[in-house]
Amino acid sequence: MADTDQQEDKMSKKNLENGKRVYVYMNDQQHVQLKVRLDYLKISMSEFVRACANGLLEGHPTMEQFMDHYRETSDKFSKKQAKTAKKDREQSDKTMEDLGIDFDEIQNIFDIIEEDHPEI
């Protein structure tokens, strides 16, 4: 394991006391190629997975486009499902734009609710 991975693991354990581990299965060739690419980018595997998860959870447009592309080209999803999901997301984005609400404002609303009602 590279020094950056060991440092990342130590930091992860400290920052994520009740965190969950995520396991990904891939063939050896994919693993080596991913590891080389991430080493080139100076990003640990853990950081990469967290960045992707955060991008998806935060509704980052680039991540949304990537997921749309993946669903459209993957054999695991029907074309109809992918098209419906994309249409629903576009409608949701339009509604939020019409109402003048962005993701940060929604996040702030949830933060306020969480502060007022921590039991939820």
Image (cartoon, helix red, strand yellow):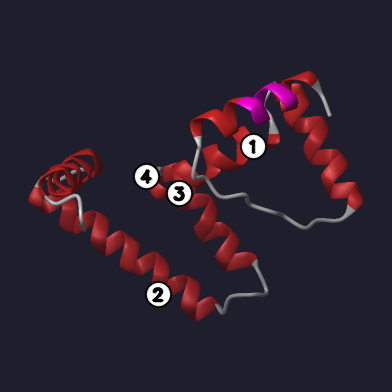
Apparent side of residue 63 relative to residue 96 in the rendered image (left or right): right
**Quarter of the image where the N terminus is located:** top right
Give the Cα separation between the discs numbered 2 and 1: 32 Å
Callout 3: SS: helix
Q: Give the Cα distance between marks 2 and 3.
A: 18 Å
Which residue type carries mark 1?
A: Ser
Query: Bounds of the magenta span?
Result: 6-10
* Mark 2 in CB contact with mark 3 (< 8 angstroms): no
Q: Position of residue 6 (x, y in %)?
A: 74, 25
Element carrying mark 1: helix
Q: Report which residue position mark 1 lands on.
A: 46
Can you say which quadrant of the picture contains the C terminus?
A: bottom left
Query: Principal SS element in the magenta part?
Result: helix
Q: Circles 4 and 3: CB distance less than 8 Å? A: yes
Which of discs 2 and 4 lies nearer the camera? The answer is 4
Residue topped by disc 4: 58
- Real-space CA distance between mark 2 and mark 4, rounded to the nearest whole angstrom: 20 Å
Q: Amino acid at mark 2?
A: Thr
Which numbered mark, 1 or 4, is in the foreground of this view? 1
Q: Earlier in the sequence, mark 2 or mark 3?
A: 3
- As measured in the structure, the alpha-carbon distance from the residue carrying label 1 to the one carrying label 4 is 18 Å
Residue at figure coordinates x 59%, y 60% from the top left: 70
How far across and how far down the image is residue 100, in percent?
A: 10, 45
Q: Residues within 10 Å of mark 2 (few under 14, many from 20)?
A: few
